[in-house]
């Protein structure tokens, strides 16, 4: 894979939720180059979450291909797809990102449990987790705490550390700042950008907030890539 | 790490999980307790008589004869005459014979008339003999030897007077002929502990002035006069018999059962015990089945708890899936949690059992004469515990499969 080959490429993808004829997603062509920071804008119900599920391989398209780092996810067996997701993609959700009963450290190390190659890239996982935490501005106290006891802002940083550990090529963030206040939002984004850059990872962030666009290399509207989306068809 | 996560998840739901574990623990304790009482009772029964080849009494049922002659449960419907007794005693096959006369009581304890030979011939628990802890066996007509429980319950010591009541649960007492405690036996764990033993002649002596179950008004023979009398009994309740050679047991048994002048019954204690087990067996099976059902109920309760927790844990499963956990991991996490709950329940149940035994042991012993030994768990009990853990894991498969389906359908997209 050359450096100009896309890290993510969707071609002629069609998807419909099982048992729901009324909602369909169709994407003719959408790709992201390595190390790009892309903001995907779309209203709620525009199919953003469906698109993310397709990219992560928790659902597979009816037709077309979804390639992450050159591998067509749909062609993999379910077990390989799960492993592939763990190896290649770091995920940050809107909120409730963490297993509240587990320690912060266990939460961060969780993806490595399912991704041996990603784990092998990290010399000392515990050390890596701690240094990510400190880079993301989490105190030592917070690192040793139980995840559920942290503030929402701290939890999002832990989620970011979890997505970044082992430097997966693709980081996907699903409205990671929507539960944060404006000041925390800005800090969080800065930290996230700095860390993705130092990991050489690509960042695909989904949001409905167009104002965030200035921080990104590229802004894509959901309506641009999925024009054929039919509502009520 | 999965183990740690499962443990953390259980800890996070400590109250529900604790209740579930408690329910399992109680059911396990009940099940093991029933087992303990069952095996304890069986062992205790089987240990009660040893070394006696035949028990002879008036013709009734063999179990009935065994129960009233050895266990002091129930009453004899009839006695055997002294003539028949002497007749049997004179047979060449008979090595020894000990008469037993029951029917009177002292407080809640039965009084048994017998001969000195009883102390030599009666054996329990693999051939152990009765031993006198304090005092001596009876020498005088009005001497009584009491079992360990009688002494402990009534706080008697050697030399104390005892008044025997006529019949069982009776208010009519043989007040005019008081006995004296001459000896206290060591604890045996058999009905002997709850028996007042007097000589066969003494039983006759206290009934000299009695007729048809009531004292003849105005008649009270002085003790010294009684001591001078022959006092040969007219009848005894039963007799324990030892035979010269093992091979002669069946011949003697047949001879007694076909005894022409009186309908008699001779039983082999071991065979009668087997018959007793057969009768008790049904109740035993029912008891095990019921306590087994209690365990099943507790496990189903656990399954219901897991089911109801699934919805609130959808988010957790979605996170695991997003991190690359295969649905199989979700299933194993739930099964692991269930197995841990069942294991904790089983261990706690075992603990409760032992705690219960420590508390209940003296009470059960006092109330039922049943000595429940506190020992290391037997292999059988460990299997029961393992089965509970396995069953816990198996019942959790149902909610786990549901979680599997849910996590496949949800993917990472649960918002709550």
Image (cartoon, rainbow, N blue to C red):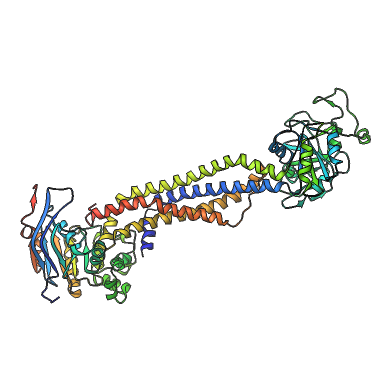
Q: Residue at x 31, y 61 (%)?
A: A147
Q: Residue at x 55, y 54 (%)?
A: B380
Placement of B173 over or under A39, stated as above or below: above
Q: Residue B275 location in percent, x, y?
A: 65, 41
Q: Nearer the viewer, residue B31 or B383?
A: B383
What residue is at 62 percent from the left and 54 percent from the top? B374
Answer left or right for A121 relative to A227.
right
Up/down of A15 relative to A118, above or below:
above
| Closest to the observer, A90 or A131 | A90
Question: Quick check: can you spot residue B160?
Answer: no
Q: Is residue B410 left or right of residue B128?
A: left
Taking depth in this image into account, of A150 and A118 the one nearest to the observer is A118
Quadrant of the frame with the N terminus of chain B: bottom left
Query: What is the tally of numbered marks visible in this picture?
Result: 0
Q: Would residue B344 be visible to someone looking at this image? A: yes
Left or right: B408 as drawn, with respect to B376: left
| Horizontal side of residue B22 vs B168, given as left or right | left
Residue A91, image quadrant? bottom left
> Which of the two residues, B360 or B116, is positioned nearer the viewer here?
B116
Residue B324 placed where, x, y %?
26, 63
Q: Give residue B397's position: percent from left, percent from top.
A: 37, 52
Q: In this picture, is B30 found above or below B237?
A: below
Residue B220 percent across, percent down from the top left: 88, 28
């Amino acid at each position: 894979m050359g450096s100009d080959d896309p890290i993510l490429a969707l071609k002629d993808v069609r998807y419909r939720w099982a048992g729901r004829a009324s909602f369909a997603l169709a994407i003719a062509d959408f790709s992201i180059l390595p190390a790009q920071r892309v903001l995907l804008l779309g209203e709620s119900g525009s199919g953003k979450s469906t698109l993310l599920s397709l990219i992560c391989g928790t659902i597979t398209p009816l037709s077309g291909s979804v390639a992450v780092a050159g591998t067509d996810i749909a062609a993999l067996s379910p077990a390989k797809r799960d492993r592939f997701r763990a190896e290649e993609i770091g995920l940050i959700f809107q909120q409730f990102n963490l297993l509240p009963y587990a320690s912060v450290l266990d939460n961060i190390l969780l993806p490595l449990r399912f991704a041996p190659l990603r784990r092998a890239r990290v010399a000392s996982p515990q050390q890596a987790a701690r240094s990510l935490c400190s880079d993301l501005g989490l105190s030592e106290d917070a690192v040793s705490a139980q995840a559920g006891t942290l503030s929402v802002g701290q939890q999002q940083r832990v989620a970011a550390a979890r997505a970044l550990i082992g430097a997966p090529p693709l980081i996907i963030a699903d409205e990671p700042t929507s539960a944060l206040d404006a000041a925390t939002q800005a800090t969080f984004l800065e930290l996230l950008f700095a860390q993705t850059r130092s990991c050489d990872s690509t960042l695909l962030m989904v949001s409905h907030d167009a104002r965030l666009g200035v921080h990104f290399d590229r802004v894509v509207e959901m309506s641009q890539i999925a024009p054929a989306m039919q509502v009520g068809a | 790490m999965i183990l740690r996560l499962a443990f953390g998840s259980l800890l996070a739901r400590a109250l529900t999980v604790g209740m579930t574990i408690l329910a399992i623990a109680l059911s396990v304790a009940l099940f093991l307790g029933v087992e303990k009482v069952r095996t304890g009772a069986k062992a205790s029964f089987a240990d009660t008589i040893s070394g006696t080849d035949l028990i002879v009494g008036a013709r009734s049922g063999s179990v009935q004869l065994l129960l009233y002659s050895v266990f002091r449960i129930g009453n004899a419907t009839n006695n055997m005459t002294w003539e028949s007794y002497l007749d049997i005693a004179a047979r060449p096959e008979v090595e020894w014979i000990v008469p037993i006369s029951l029917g009177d009581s002292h407080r809640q304890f039965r009084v048994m008339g017998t001969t000195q030979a009883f102390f030599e011939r009666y054996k329990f628990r693999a051939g152990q003999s009765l031993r006198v802890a304090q005092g001596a066996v009876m020498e005088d007509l009005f001497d009584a030897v009491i079992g360990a429980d009688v002494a402990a319950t009534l706080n008697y010591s050697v030399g104390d007077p005892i008044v025997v009541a006529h019949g069982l649960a009776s208010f009519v007492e043989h007040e005019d002929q008081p006995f004296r405690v001459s000896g206290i036996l060591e604890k045996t764990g058999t009905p002997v502990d709850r028996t007042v033993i007097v000589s066969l002649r003494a039983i006759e002596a206290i009934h000299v002035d009695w007729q048809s179950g009531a004292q003849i008004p105005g008649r009270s023979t002085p003790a010294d006069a009684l001591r001078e009398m022959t006092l040969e009994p007219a009848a005894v309740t039963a007799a324990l018999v030892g035979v010269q050679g093992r091979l002669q047991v069946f011949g003697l048994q047949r001879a007694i059962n076909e005894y022409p002048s009186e309908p008699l019954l001779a039983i082999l204690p071991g065979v009668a015990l087997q018959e007793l087990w057969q009768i008790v067996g049904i109740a035993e099976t029912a008891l095990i089945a019921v306590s087994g059902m209690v365990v099943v109920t507790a496990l189903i309760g656990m399954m219901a708890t897991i089911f109801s927790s699934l919805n609130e844990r959808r988010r957790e499963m979605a996170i695991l899936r997003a991190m690359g956990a295969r649905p199989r991991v979700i299933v194993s996490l739930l099964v692991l949690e269930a197995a841990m709950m069942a294991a904790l329940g089983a261990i706690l149940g075992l603990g409760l059992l032992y705690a219960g035994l420590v508390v209940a042991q003296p009470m059960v012993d006092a109330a039922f004469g049943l000595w429940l030994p506190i020992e290391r768990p037997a292999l059988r009990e460990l299997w029961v515990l393992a089965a509970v853990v396995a069953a816990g894991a198996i019942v959790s498969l149902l909610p786990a499969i549901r979680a599997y389906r849910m996590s496949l359908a949800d993917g990472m997209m649960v918002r709550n």
